[in-house]
Image: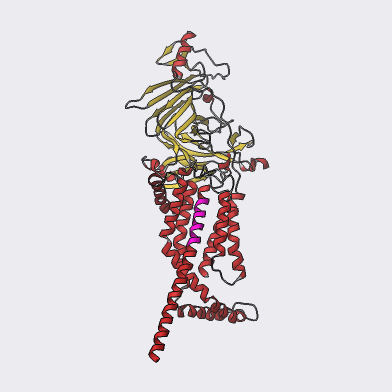
């Protein structure tokens, strides 16, 4: 039964770790709401056209598509600077500029030239709308805003930039934003192509320490997803070929990474990422933790995490998010950015190495082929990921059948020899310790020698039952990580009430059925005479039920299929064993009859 003890120890340790993280880990923040901004449909006139028409109506000159105001013209809400440029370039009102292609629909506000919306057309949210990548917020500026060295947003974030769009050479679109006025001077340019990667250039004059801001977070996960401890969110970067992570739930202070040797840095969660590839003018990348205040309100407010000594008791319990800053070494920053889903095949097609963000843990080398096989099954065999999981689980069990059979045979032999082994243990029990209560190593050695002698005389290797388990554990964990992180399962239905395999069963039917099948499996499994061991094995289904109640339905379906196949396998093994015993008895009877006839 040594192999059973090993398996029990491994499974129980795994359950304890998962259960602890699931039920006692930090509670994530609920999503906020997006500030209302009047959106412009792609077919409407651009921001530059609207600004130009308003400027002409007010008698303001227009040059090169940019709105020019006189040197003394200042927005009433702005603070004037002493070094106001002679030529004022700014818009007359706030508006949006929309860029749309087959992959996404991005909206930039000319107030601060910030990205206020980035929707992915190929991926839908719970309401059937394109996924929004720009996280809902209050209290924090939007992506591609400007931040000073003291965590403060620059006044340029409130400036109304003049906007101009044009078709790029070779296709794609270009957006150019320019502001020159009482709040400072800056230009921002964005160059879009069909690959999903876009280039940006930001230039700020008369600022010594400034950064381009992204985040906090990537996408807008649902409240249910945020309750799941396995729903990763934070930062990730690749430096010198090594991938490193920054956990949003554990971050306490800024983490600074030099751009020397840095390939990319990204904000990501389980399914989506917003990545940046810093270019010329970038000094370092900073991952900055934020507090999510008022998590029970519709619009949670984000604020920079204070120093540890300044945190209040209430703030220590508040959820956190991660923002990303690209810090300049001068007055200009260039770089590239990618916003999208963590689809391994799509990321691997880009020459950036972003496929490293799709993390399946230590057994990624096994999870990748399993993912390919799962997708192939979905595309070529059955167009339903639930049934594809069932077929993949059965295929894995069939491939493992020789190892499993060998393990069951070995366990049965060990079970048959257990009375002899227990008799030896009982005979040596009083000799295992001396009168002082110290272990008697000589007696223990003799006992083990006798037990091994019993195994050897019957041709049984006690370790042979463990070897199949060792081979099966990596496959199990690889498939477990795959089903927990594969974006293919996001919003993928199975049958009836299971309309999203990436979330829990709303009625807990799958976990309960899984518990019943596992209990039946444990009852029909041969167990040792040790009552404590029997109780431990019978407790396992209850432990699994406790852990799997809030697991994604795809994972529960995988384990349920394992249990059902295991029950059939047990029954098949019993039939095989009975027929083998009958055949052996027939041979024995035939031999006995032959000996009798010879004597006669």
- Range shown magenta: 556-568
Q: Residue furthest right?
A: 313
Question: Between 233 and 289, which is closer to the camera in this rendering?
Answer: 233
> At 46% across and 43% down in the image, what residue appears?
487
Q: Quadrant of residue 175?
A: top left
Mark yes or no: residue 268 visible.
Answer: yes
Q: Residue furthest bottom?
A: 600
Left or right: residue 425 compared with residue 347: right
Residue 564, percent across and down?
Answer: 50, 57
- Specify how the rendered protein is coloured: secondary structure
Question: Between 510 and 270, which is closer to the camera in this rendering?
Answer: 510
Main SS of the magenta part reads: helix
Q: In the rendered view, would you say 356 is above or below 124? A: below
Q: Quadrant of the C terminus?
A: bottom left
Q: In the rendered view, would you say 535 is above or below 109? A: below
Residue 311, percent across and down?
Answer: 64, 41
Q: Residue furthest left?
A: 170
Residue 562, percent across and down?
Answer: 49, 56
Question: Between 410 and 498, which is closer to the camera in this rendering?
Answer: 498
Question: Between 490 and 16, which is closer to the camera in this rendering?
Answer: 490
Q: Is 561 within the magenta?
A: yes
Q: Is 535 within the magenta?
A: no
Q: Quadrant of residue 430?
A: bottom right
> At 52% across and 25% down in the image, what residue appears?
157
Mark yes or no: residue 260 visible.
Answer: no
Residue 84, percent across and down?
Answer: 50, 18
Q: In the rendered view, would you say 262 is above or below 50? A: below
> At 44% across and 66% down in the image, what residue appears?
405
């Amino acid at each position: 039964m040594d192999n059973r003890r090993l398996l029990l120890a491994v499974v129980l340790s795994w359950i304890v770790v998962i259960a602890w993280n699931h039920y006692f880990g930090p509670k994530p923040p609920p999503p906020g709401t997006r500030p209302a901004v009047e959106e412009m449909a792609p077919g409407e006139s651009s921001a530059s056209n609207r600004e130009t028409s308003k400027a002409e109506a007010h008698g303001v000159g227009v040059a090169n598509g940019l709105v020019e105001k006189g040197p003394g013209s200042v927005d009433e809400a702005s603070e004037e600077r002493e070094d106001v440029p002679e030529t004022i370039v700014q818009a007359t009102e706030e508006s949006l500029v929309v860029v749309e292609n087959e992959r996404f629909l991005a909206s930039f506000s000319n107030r601060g030239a910030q990205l206020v919306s980035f929707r992915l057309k190929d991926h839908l949210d719970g309401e059937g709308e394109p996924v929004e990548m720009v996280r809902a917020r209050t209290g924090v500026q939007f992506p591609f805003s400007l931040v000073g060295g003291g965590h403060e947003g620059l006044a340029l974030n409130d400036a109304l930039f003049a906007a101009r769009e044009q078709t790029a050479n070779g296709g794609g679109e270009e957006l150019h934003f320019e502001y020159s006025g009482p709040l400072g001077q800056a230009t921002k340019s964005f160059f879009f192509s069909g690959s999903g990667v876009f280039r940006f250039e930001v230039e700020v004059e008369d600022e010594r320490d400034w950064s381009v801001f992204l985040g906090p977070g990537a996408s807008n996960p649902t409240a249910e997803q945020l309750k799941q401890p396995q729903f990763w969110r934070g930062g990730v970067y690749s430096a010198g070929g090594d991938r490193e992570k920054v956990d949003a739930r554990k971050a306490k202070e800024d983490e600074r990474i030099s751009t020397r040797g840095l390939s990319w840095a990204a904000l990501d969660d389980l399914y989506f990422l917003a990545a940046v590839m810093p270019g010329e003018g970038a000094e370092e990348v900073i991952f900055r933790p934020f507090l999510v205040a008022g998590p029970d309100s519709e619009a949670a407010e984000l604020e920079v995490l204070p120093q540890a000594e300044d945190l209040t008791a209430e703030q220590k319990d508040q959820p956190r998010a991660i923002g990303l800053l690209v810090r300049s070494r001068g007055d200009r920053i260039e770089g590239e950015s990618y916003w999208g889903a963590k689809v391994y095949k799509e990321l691997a097609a880009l020459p950036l190495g972003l496929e490293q963000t799709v993390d399946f843990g230590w057994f990624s080398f096994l999870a990748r082929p399993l993912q390919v096989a799962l997708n192939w099954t979905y595309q070529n065999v059955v167009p339903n990921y639930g049934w594809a999981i069932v077929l993949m689980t059965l295929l894995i069990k069939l491939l493992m059948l020789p190892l499993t059979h060998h393990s069951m045979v070995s366990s049965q032999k060990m079970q048959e020899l257990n009375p002899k082994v227990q008799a030896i243990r009982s005979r040596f029990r009083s000799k295992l310790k001396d009168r002082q209560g110290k272990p008697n190593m000589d007696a223990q050695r003799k006992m083990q020698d006798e037990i091994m002698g019993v195994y050897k005389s019957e041709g049984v290797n006690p370790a042979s039952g463990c070897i199949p388990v060792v081979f099966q554990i990596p496959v199990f964990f690889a498939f477990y990580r795959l089903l927990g992180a594969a974006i293919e399962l996001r919003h993928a239905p199975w049958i009836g009430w299971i309309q999203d395999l990436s979330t829990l069963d709303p009625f807990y039917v799958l976990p309960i059925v899984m518990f019943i099948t596992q209990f039946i499996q444990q009852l029909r499994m041969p167990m040792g005479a040790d009552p404590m061991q029997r109780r431990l094995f019978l407790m396992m289904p209850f432990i699994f039920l406790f852990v799997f109640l809030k697991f994604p339905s795809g994972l529960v379906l995988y384990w349920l299929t394992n249990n059902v196949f295991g029950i059939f396998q047990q029954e098949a093994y019993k039939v095989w064993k009975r027929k083998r015993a009958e055949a052996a008895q027939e041979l024995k009877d035939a031999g006995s009859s032959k000996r009798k006839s010879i004597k006669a």
